[in-house]
């Protein structure tokens, strides 16, 4: 980090540059750490794109801080795989509490928190893409089960074949991809002149699709779109989702970190209508990749959708109602102790420190905007 500004931001290597720099096969005998570190500079660094260089302006920010890095090292050192409570109680319990801490500091409604004695709770996913996919798959199962109960003659395949999910035409490509992976058709709602998805256009699409015998079941609203950081209108979309019994997922992958500052929370007005909410502390909240926070109002929607119980994963406390087995909340089985990163970062910066960090970035953005305005060609 100390020399990062002197490194070339985007490497000038050609594809295939690396293979000739190292042997064709793994060494028979072990090597020393010093030898390996020398090769990091010779082989790796010339090919790194430096996301933390002050001259890097591509894509989106990726977070990094020394508490985050230390926590990642500790996670590696402990090296547990926390798929169930029994497979590592601390890994499970710290995650549940950290997601409550984080939910509280960004002003999420109580129903999303596990400690509220409600039915909600949070989990760390690897990426926002996984969070959207989980939400869509859970909604798919929930709706399919409900409709099969109401119409026992319909097969699950018939129901899924008629399902439709919606997002704005500004949503991230991962939302469309969730549709491709889950086999649910995804329709894009045209956004308005501010790149905002509005209730009117959503309602029109729903009416047309229902008239064609399709089954609307899921809406993904974005708070902070990738192309322009626009915000979908939750106060219009939310009530429609409630009336129509549609699962509302909110993708706030990038902008969600800003909700740690109360003055930006007007941008999440209507969040109370959502069934699930996601943002990436690994983008803008100083937690090193990967850490994507995902909350649901009803944890049974996730657990009910993905529960399998082979004997080798069972443990004494699983039916006690006192423990969380995160394996039911995600696609992979294995999971790292990622909540250490949240714990270290939240404690070492404090909420005030993180708020200052976000406010500084917003101030810099305003300053940049001001410079652009004064230099705009006539
Ligand atoms: N959603 C939005 C709004 C994004 O900006 C991005 C990434 O830029 C994503 C989703 C995908 O994020 P991830 O890499 O965590 O899947």
Image (spheres, rainbow, N blue to C red):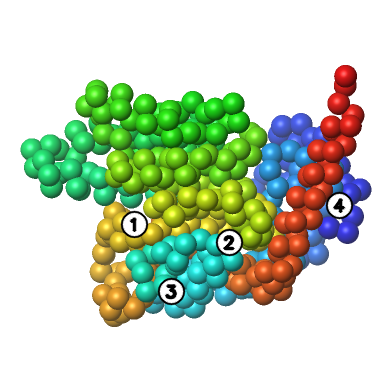
Q: How far apart are the two marked residues, 2 and 4, measured between alpha carbons? A: 32 Å
Residue at 24%, 23% (x, y): give it. Answer: 212
Instruction: Kindly state the secondary structure of the residue where label 1 is placed.
Output: helix
* Sooner in the amino-acid sequence: mark 4 or mark 1: 4
Q: Is residue 107 above or below residue 275?
A: below
Question: Along the line of sight, which residue is nearer the eye, 160 or 181?
Answer: 160
Judge depth for marks 3 and 1 and give the one in front: 3
Query: What is the crowding at mark 1: few (fewer than 14 residues within 10 Å), some, or many (at least 20)?
Result: many
Task: Give the residue at mark 3.
Answer: 115
* Sooner in the amino-acid sequence: mark 2 or mark 4: 4
Q: Residue 156 placed where, x, y %?
A: 19, 40
Task: Give the residue at mark 2.
Answer: 106
Task: Give the residue at mark 4.
Answer: 4
Residue at 52%, 39% (x, y): give it. Answer: 232
Judge depth for marks 2 and 4 and give the one in front: 2
Q: Which mark is residue 302?
A: 1
Instruction: Kindly state the secondary structure of the residue where label 2 is placed.
Output: loop
Report the quarter where the C terminus lies: top right
Can residue 20 be seen here? The reply is no
Q: Are marks 4 and 1 in contact (CB under 8 Å)?
A: no
Q: Are marks 3 and 2 in contact (CB under 8 Å)?
A: no
Whether the residue carrying mark 3 lies under 8 Å from ligand 1 is answered with: no
* Sooner in the amino-acid sequence: mark 3 or mark 1: 3
Q: How far apart are the two marked residues, 3 and 1, measured between alpha carbons? A: 17 Å
């Amino acid at each position: 980090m100390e020399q990062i500004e002197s490194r070339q931001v985007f490497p000038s290597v050609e594809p295939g540059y690396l293979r000739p720099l190292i042997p064709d096969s793994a060494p028979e005998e072990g090597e020393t750490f010093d030898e390996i570190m020398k090769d990091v500079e010779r082989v790796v660094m010339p090919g790194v794109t430096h996301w933390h260089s002050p001259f890097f302006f591509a894509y989106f920010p990726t977070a990094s801080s020394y508490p985050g890095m230390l926590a990642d090292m500790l996670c590696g050192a402990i090296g547990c795989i926390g798929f169930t409570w029994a497979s590592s109680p601390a890994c499970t319990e710290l995650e549940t509490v950290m997601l409550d801490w984080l939910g509280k500091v960004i002003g999420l409604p109580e129903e999303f928190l596990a400690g509220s004695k409600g039915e909600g709770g949070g989990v760390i996913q690897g990426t926002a893409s996984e969070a959207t996919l989980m939400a869509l798959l859970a909604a798919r199962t929930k709706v399919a089960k409900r409709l099969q109960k109401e119409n026992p003659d319909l097969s699950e395949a018939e129901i899924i074949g008629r399902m439709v999910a919606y997002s704005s035409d500004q949503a991230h490509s991962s939302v469309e991809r969730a549709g491709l992976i889950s086999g649910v058709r995804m329709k894009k709602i045209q956004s308005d002149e501010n790149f905002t998805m509005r209730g009117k256009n959503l309602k029109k699409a729903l009416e047309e699709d229902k008239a064609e015998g399709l089954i609307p079941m899921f809406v993904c609203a974005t708070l902070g779109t990738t192309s322009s950081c626009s915000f979908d209108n939750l106060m219009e979309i939310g009530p429609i989702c409630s009336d129509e019994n549609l699962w509302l997922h909110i993708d706030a992958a990038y902008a969600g970190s800003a909700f740690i500052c109360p003055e930006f929370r007007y941008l999440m007005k209507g969040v109370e209508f959502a069934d699930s909410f996601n943002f990436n502390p690994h983008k803008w909240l100083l937690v090193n990749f990967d850490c994507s926070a995902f909350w649901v109002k009803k944890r049974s929607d996730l657990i009910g959708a993905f529960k399998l119980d082979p004997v080798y994963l069972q443990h004494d406390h699983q039916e006690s109602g006192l423990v969380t087995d995160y394996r039911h909340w995600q696609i992979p089985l294995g999971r790292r102790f990622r909540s250490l990163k949240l714990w270290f970062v939240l404690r070492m910066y404090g909420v005030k420190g993180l708020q200052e960090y976000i406010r500084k970035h917003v101030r810099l953005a305003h300053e940049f905007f001001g410079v652009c305005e004064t230099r705009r060609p006539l």
